[in-house]
Image: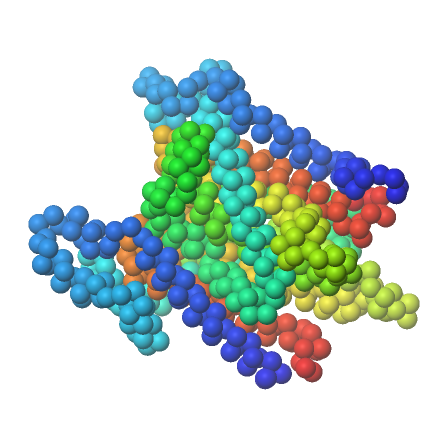
């Protein structure tokens, strides 16, 4: 056992958990769908066909058509791309903020820690969706164009087309970093007292070096787990926002805004409600399975028991 | 004990100020002013009239002054006047004295959330206990799978499916509003039945995710407790299994659950935006959605603040519950 690298050991334990592996396969598959969306979608996702408005699922349109005669399957395939992009970027932002804030708070302690912890309490006391909704509705999507460097916004716009989506990513990122920050802080509090840190300091390592290359690397595992689970949560938030009409705006397709059409046509077009919801469920479920599988694989208390 | 509670209460005060400050800050990040919206609706408005409006709302003053003015009024539960065309005081919109208690927005949302909490607790705890005590049984496997699926189900999708099945297809339950059109002509028992029927779907949807989450936590918390030495001791001295589980085990397993229940309050209240919107329920969530869309600043601020106060109260209640469940804290 000792000869194997930690990564290999982790994979060995993860592989034993069949559900987690199934989730991993699904995550990979969804990723491929998102990347190859233009090649696999049978129709143009915004191709309007007035002769086929709200057609039930058929051989031509396996998931039916919407109120403008657009193919629902094609819209869902493109929606997959949007959902994953929002989920991953939003959680990337949240993880970055969480790492930074948690590291500062845990490493320096004292009044910095007290202020940060109080601020996290404040963020967590505002009803989650209220906070997100207020920020989404109030922040001008053009604000980011002014703050972020030009090439970033240009790249994002070219990659995902809709500037509004960048706004959603940032807002979800800004409202979901608190868990990571608490996690990282706790790791820092315990790791900074270890002897190897004292050794590093004795050898003349500065604060930055200790924070980033000695403590942070060793606290990445739980952060990674929480990021995987976070992607699932962010996808749920995005779909809820789009469902309420505050997220991804039509004509850009997203699972949430197809569901909003499903609600408007609930008496006549069940397929608009059933299929996109299923897609969200499967995606979120897959990420959760992978996240939980990783967590179990990392938990030394579960190593001995062969049966998960 | 009282000292512990007092300390917890005092800790809430800076959090409360932080909340008001943060929501005030977010709202003032907004592009444009509410008077822009007023003048959009009425293009004939003169610059002088606009200025007058801005002065009336204090929008021409520095932000710090505006915050001070707002805070001074909030302490008296006066959240100012709504920017909407009816210009009613914000508090009246949230807690309308002309309406019967059951139809006041804050009461509607509050009661649905309390009902959901009760249902989550009543369903999730027994499920969690049986899954833990019958680990790897068929029941445990079925519930664990359902929990995973339930956790991944978007609430608003579940709501749509239930509306299709029970509302439209089977026609068993009403799908919107809190009461029927002919409510006033119903007898007392008819009224109660009518309201109950209207509440079934919304309460089920809002408690669904919580049931999944809490039963899973209850399961792992119970499993953790069963492993402890004092449970082995209890068994060794010959106590019947039910006593071991429900007297020695349950109490300890419930401790983390109480904290969790307190932590779930902001999620529940936030979720009311979505299900109130779907089921057309006139509560705080629907009002918040409307106020955000209309940029009705005073109303948004009021609802954010009240939501946060409810959350803080929830946390405090969780602490009190914790105290009753854990004698170690009472001694401190």
Q: How is the image coloured?
A: rainbow
Tell which of B252 and B179 is nearer to you: B252
- Residue farthest top in this picture: A60
User: x, y (%) of residue A242?
Assistant: 42, 40
User: x, y (%) of residue B99?
Assistant: 30, 66
Residue at 74%, 57% (x, y): give it.
A203
Q: Is residue B292 visible?
A: no
Horizontally, is A300 left or right of A21 in the view? right
Task: Locate the N terminus of chain B by quadrant.
Answer: bottom right
Task: Locate the C terminus of chain B by quadrant.
Answer: bottom right
Residue at 52%, 46% (x, y): give it.
A93
Residue at 31%, 53% (x, y): give it.
B30
Residue at 50%, 73% (x, y): give it.
B12
Tell which of B126 and B312 is nearer to you: B312
Where A207 falls versus B101 (above or below)?
above
- Residue farthest front in this picture: A204
Tell which of A115 and B26 is nearer to you: A115
- Residue farthest bottom in this picture: B2
User: x, y (%) of residue A167?
Assistant: 41, 43
Tell which of A131 and A102 is nearer to you: A102
Horizontally, is B29 left or right of A303 in the view? left
Q: Is residue B109 visible?
A: yes
User: x, y (%) of residue B284?
Assistant: 38, 59
Disc tally is 0
């Amino acid at each position: 056992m000792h000869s194997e690298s930690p990564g290999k050991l982790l994979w060995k334990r993860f592989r034993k958990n069949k559900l987690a592996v199934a989730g991993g396969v699904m995550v990979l598959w969804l990723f491929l769908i998102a990347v190859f969306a233009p090649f696999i979608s049978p129709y143009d996702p915004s191709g309007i066909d007035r002769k086929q408005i709200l057609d039930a699922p058929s051989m031509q349109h396996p998931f039916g058509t919407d109120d403008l005669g657009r193919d629902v399957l094609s819209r869902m395939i493109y929606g997959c791309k949007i959902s994953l992009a929002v989920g991953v970027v939003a959680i990337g932002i949240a993880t970055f903020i969480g790492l930074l804030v948690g590291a500062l708070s845990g490493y320096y302690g004292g009044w910095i820690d007290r202020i940060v912890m109080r601020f996290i309490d404040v963020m967590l006391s505002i009803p989650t969706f209220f906070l997100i909704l207020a920020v989404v509705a109030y922040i001008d999507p053009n604000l980011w164009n002014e703050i972020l460097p030009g090439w970033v916004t240009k790249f994002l716009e070219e990659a995902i087309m809709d500037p509004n989506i960048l706004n959603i990513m940032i807002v979800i990122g800004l409202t979901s970093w608190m868990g990571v920050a608490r996690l990282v802080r706790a790791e820092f509090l315990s790791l900074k007292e270890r002897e190897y840190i004292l050794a590093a300091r004795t050898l003349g390592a500065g604060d930055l070096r200790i924070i980033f290359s000695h403590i942070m690397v060793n606290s990445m595992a739980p952060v990674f787990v929480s990021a995987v689970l976070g992607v699932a949560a962010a996808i749920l938030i995005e779909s809820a926002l789009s469902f309420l009409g505050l997220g991804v705006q039509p004509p850009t397709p997203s699972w949430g805004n197809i569901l909003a059409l499903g609600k408007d046509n609930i008496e006549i077009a069940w397929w608009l409600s059933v299929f996109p919801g299923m897609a969200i469920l499967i995606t979120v479920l897959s990420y959760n399975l992978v996240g939980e599988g990783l967590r179990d694989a990392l938990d030394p208390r579960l190593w001995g028991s062969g049966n998960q | 004990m009282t000292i512990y509670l007092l300390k917890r209460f005092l800790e809430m005060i800076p959090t409360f100020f932080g909340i008001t400050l943060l929501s005030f800050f977010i709202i003032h990040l907004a592009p444009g002013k509410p008077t822009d919206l007023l003048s959009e609706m009425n293009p004939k408005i003169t610059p002088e009239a606009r200025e007058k409006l801005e002065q009336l709302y204090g929008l021409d003053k520095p932000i710090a002054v505006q915050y001070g003015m707002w805070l001074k009024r909030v302490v008296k539960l006066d959240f100012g006047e709504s920017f909407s065309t009816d210009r009613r005081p914000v508090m009246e919109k949230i807690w309308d004295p002309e309406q019967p208690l059951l139809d006041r927005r804050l009461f509607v949302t509050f009661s649905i959330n309390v009902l959901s909490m009760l249902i989550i607790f009543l369903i999730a705890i027994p499920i969690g206990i049986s899954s833990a005590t019958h680990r790897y049984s068929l029941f445990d496997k079925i519930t664990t799978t359902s929990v995973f699926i339930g956790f991944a189900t978007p609430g608003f999708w579940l709501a749509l499916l239930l509306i299709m099945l029970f509302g439209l297809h089977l026609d068993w339950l009403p799908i919107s509003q809190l009461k029927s059109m002919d409510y006033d002509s119903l007898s007392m028992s008819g009224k109660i039945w009518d309201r109950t029927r209207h509440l079934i779907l919304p309460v089920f949807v809002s408690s669904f995710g919580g049931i999944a989450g809490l039963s899973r936590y209850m399961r792992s918390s119970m499993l953790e407790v069963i492993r402890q030495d004092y449970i082995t001791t209890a068994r060794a001295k010959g106590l019947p299994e039910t006593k071991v589980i429900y007297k020695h085990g349950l109490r300890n397993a419930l401790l983390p659950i109480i904290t969790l229940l307190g932590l779930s309050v902001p999620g529940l209240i936030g979720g009311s935006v979505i299900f109130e919107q779907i089921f057309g329920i006139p509560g705080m969530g629907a009002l918040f959605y409307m106020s955000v869309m209309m940029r009705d600043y005073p109303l948004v601020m009021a609802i954010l603040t009240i939501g946060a106060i409810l959350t803080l109260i929830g946390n405090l209640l969780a602490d009190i519950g914790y105290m009753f469940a854990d004698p170690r804290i009472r001694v401190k």
